[in-house]
């Protein structure tokens, strides 16, 4: 069974930092793209950052220069360092990956940024 397990969410004050991590289990072989999406109450799920297995990263416009995504291909993990957090970053953050032509999601982790 494929599982994506996120960790690292929580409550932080504006201007603070958090680091999210996601571990993939139940697969064989390498993961293609990995990344993070988020969904705030009443809003659509949006791209935060994605990274290819070659290490090329793309970011949503609202997080560029504040968030940094990274991955460990040997361990099938993806992490994201979030700095200079703003109240508008408050959302549930979902880990995502593609493997064998299918997309998979984690259960989500809550990030709350207080003003």
Image (cartoon, rainbow, N blue to C red):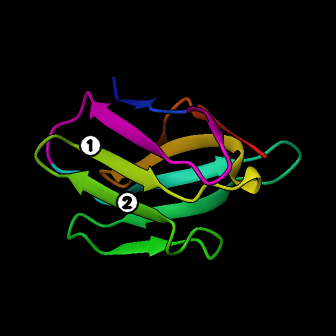
In front of the other: 2 or 89: 89
The residue carrying pointer 2 sits among few (fewer than 14), some (14 to 19) or many (20 or more) residues within 10 Å by Cα, namely many
Q: Can you tell which quarter of the image residue 21 is in? A: top left
The residue carrying pointer 1 sits among few (fewer than 14), some (14 to 19) or many (20 or more) residues within 10 Å by Cα, namely many
Give the image location of residue 76, x and y in percent: 22, 43
In front of the other: 72 or 12: 12
Q: Can you tell which quarter of the image residue 6 is in? A: top left
Asked whether the viewer can see residue 103, the reply is: no
Q: Residue furthest top?
A: 1
Image-based side of 8 in relation to 53, left or right: right
How many marks are shown on the rendered structure? Answer: 2
Which residue corresponds to mark 1?
Answer: 77
Which residue corresponds to mark 2?
Answer: 69
In front of the other: 8 or 47: 8
User: Was residue 19 drawn as part of the magenta stretch in this picture?
Assistant: yes
Bounds of the magenta segment: 10-29
Asked whether the viewer can see residue 69, the reply is: yes
Q: Is residue 52 above or below residue 23?
A: below
Q: Earlier in the sequence, mark 2 or mark 1?
A: 2
- Which residue is painted at 60% across and 62% down in the image? 47
């Amino acid at each position: 069974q494929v599982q994506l397990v996120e960790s690292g969410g929580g409550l932080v004050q504006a201007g603070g930092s958090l680091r999210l991590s996601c571990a993939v289990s139940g697969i064989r072989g390498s993961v293609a793209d990995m990344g993070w999406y988020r969904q705030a109450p009443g809003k659509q799920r949006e791209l935060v950052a994605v990274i290819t297995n070659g290490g090329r990263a793309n970011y949503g416009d609202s997080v560029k220069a504040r968030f940094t995504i990274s991955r460990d291909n040997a361990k099938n993990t993806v992490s994201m360092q979030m700095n200079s957090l703003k109240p508008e970053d408050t959302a549930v953050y979902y880990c995502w990956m593609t493997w064998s032509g299918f997309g998979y999601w984690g259960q989500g982790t809550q990030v709350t940024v207080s003003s």
